[in-house]
Amino acid sequence: MIRDITIGQYYAADSPIHRLDARVKIVVTLVYMVSLFTFQDFAGYAAAILFFGIVLALSKVPFSYIMRGLKPVLFILLLTGMLNLFWTPGKEIFAWGVVAVTWEGIRKMIYITLRLALLILGASIMTFTTTPNQLTAGLERLLRPLKIFRVPVHEVAMMMSIALRFIPILVEETDRIMKAQAARGADFESGNAFQRMKSMLPVLVPLFVSAIRRAGELALAMDSRCYHGGEGRTKMYPLRYRGRDIFGYLCCLVYIAALAVTVRISPF
Amino acid sequence: MSIRLENVFYIYGKGTKEETCALKKINLTIEKNEFVGIIGHTGSGKSTLLRLLNGLERATEGSVYYNGKNIYDKDFSMKTLRGKVGLVFQYPEHQLFEETVIKDVQFGPANMGMTPLETELFAFQALKDVGIGEELIDVSPFLLSGGQKRRVALAGVLAMKPEVLALDEPVAGLDPEGKENIFALLKRLQKERDLTILFVSHSMEDIAEYADRVIVMNQGEIVLDGEPHKVFRYQKELGQIGLDVPVSAKIANSLREKGFAIPGDCITVDETADAVIRWYQDRKRGAV
Ligand SMILES: Nc1ncnc2c1ncn2[C@@H]1O[C@H](COP(=O)(O)OP(=O)(O)OP(=O)(O)O)[C@@H](O)[C@H]1O
Ligand SMILES: [Mg+2]
């Protein structure tokens, strides 16, 4: 059950998208996500879906795999879809009390759900094709200018990569502790919400104890290898733009241009 | 009491890219009062096998019978089974969570639906069995030493009054004395309380010393199963799957190869020592 969590999951494969510089993927993903808010009509969505489809096909990540990322947010998708379906004023198809289904409502529902879904899918294709390490390295490089404002960019990036690294470990640990307590008859499924919360205590206490122990051990290990923050640190794999990365940016530009041409960018 | 596994398969992550077949066609019967050691290379499926015995994992295929009843039947009570087959995980001390030792030990029996009186009684008894003194019962388990924590965790399972005790590497990381204490305790439980004991170990010496029956696993399959003296005769086969025979067996074997009259079934230190002494005395007698 707990293994369904897909945040920060990496899908190992050898594809043009995987080989791209992490910075390209971060920038293009951001641009893509922003672009989703610039249009309100069919042509725009067609272009956005097409762009996503091409990237997905190139990335070799299976369709079913990427769709699994939508599962945790399915409820939110459905809810916003419903709200838009029932509460959009316009030409009514049928009405039932306060709620009314309108043509505009149907259109809006489809568009809003699509937009949300594409936002999440766009972000997950980035995490699926970029290892957490590459991601934080890319982010660190992109944010480097903020150093002028005394933002501890390296430290933040390091914290992020450690946090990401620990997710699978803690998930596994949770799984193991839950099984161990289940072997002592612990029951996590029955009872009301309060009882179930209480039944998590035998899992949470050992989990925190082990997380703190691990954190301490990691700090010691870093200390004993003379880690002293970002000052004067060089990279084992320095980020360097190659031809394909330039090409990646170009493709993104083409997408934006296509959007601008096919869609009269909405005034809002 | 008996546990029977029939054609059991277990696959992790079925249907995903990382599908691993951890157990393949396991057929196995464990009888009452046996003391079974399980050995095998890392990743051979030992821990998975143990977790099937009390229904924590469900076999992908095949059935598990407890006292002849299929544990996957709808009307079979998994909770009772968890109480009957006490499973002690590797590093069980990592599951301690209560404020005091005694409360932690009571967690299992209380979950089994025992009365508060029984719960307390069994908890005290279990702590006594594992050798945790009265001065420690109201202490926080997090203040104990590693070996003490391990015993408290073991007591937490014993207090459920199981009929079978399955332990995953129970002595990993313990000092020699702690190790001997644990095994002595297990032997005593087997003799005095009629418990059935299964334990996973990476130490051939421990298996030779304590197990009455040894199961050898390789890549999810049981490759050898029998009395330790018999199993450890397959030195070459064991070597091929990354295992070994006990050091004392090796010594006895190489002495025999060098022409000394040492019998072929020495696997423990005592047996080898006795054989050498016997050989020495025979020679002296012959010489006189
Ligand atoms: N939670 C899991 N998810 C996926 N695969 C797993 C999981 N647990 C174990 N496996 C795989 O199943 C196989 C058997 O694992 P198992 O833990 O039973 O081995 P083991 O014999 O106990 O090894 P060890 O001696 O290292 O404890 C291994 O190949 C392992 O990679
Ligand atoms: Mg194991």
Image (cartoon, grey):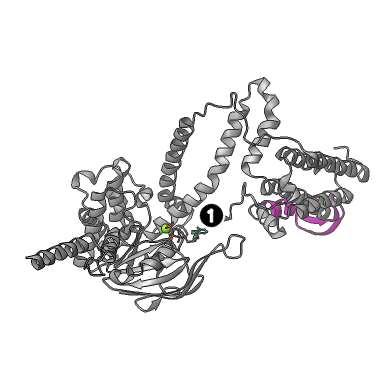
**Residue at x-position 33% and y-position 57%:** B203
Secondary structure at badge 1 equals: helix
Residue occupied by mark 1: A2
Q: On the picture, is B136 further left or further right than A246? A: left
Which of B92 and B79 lies nearest the eye of the viewer? B92
Amino acid found under the numbered disc labelled 1: Ile
Which of B159 and A212 lies nearest the eye of the viewer? A212
Q: Give the range drawn in magenta.
A: A76-104
Residue A12 lies, in percent from the top left, at 65, 52
Residue B125 lies, in percent from the top left, at 21, 57
Task: Say which quarter of the image contains residue B230.
Answer: bottom left
Residue A74 lies, in percent from the top left, at 67, 55
Residue B55 visible in rendering: no
Q: On the picture, is B266 further left or further right than B82? A: left
Task: Say which quarter of the image contains residue B233.
Answer: bottom left
Look at the numbered disc 1 and say if its residue's Cβ is closer than 8 Å to ligand 1.
no
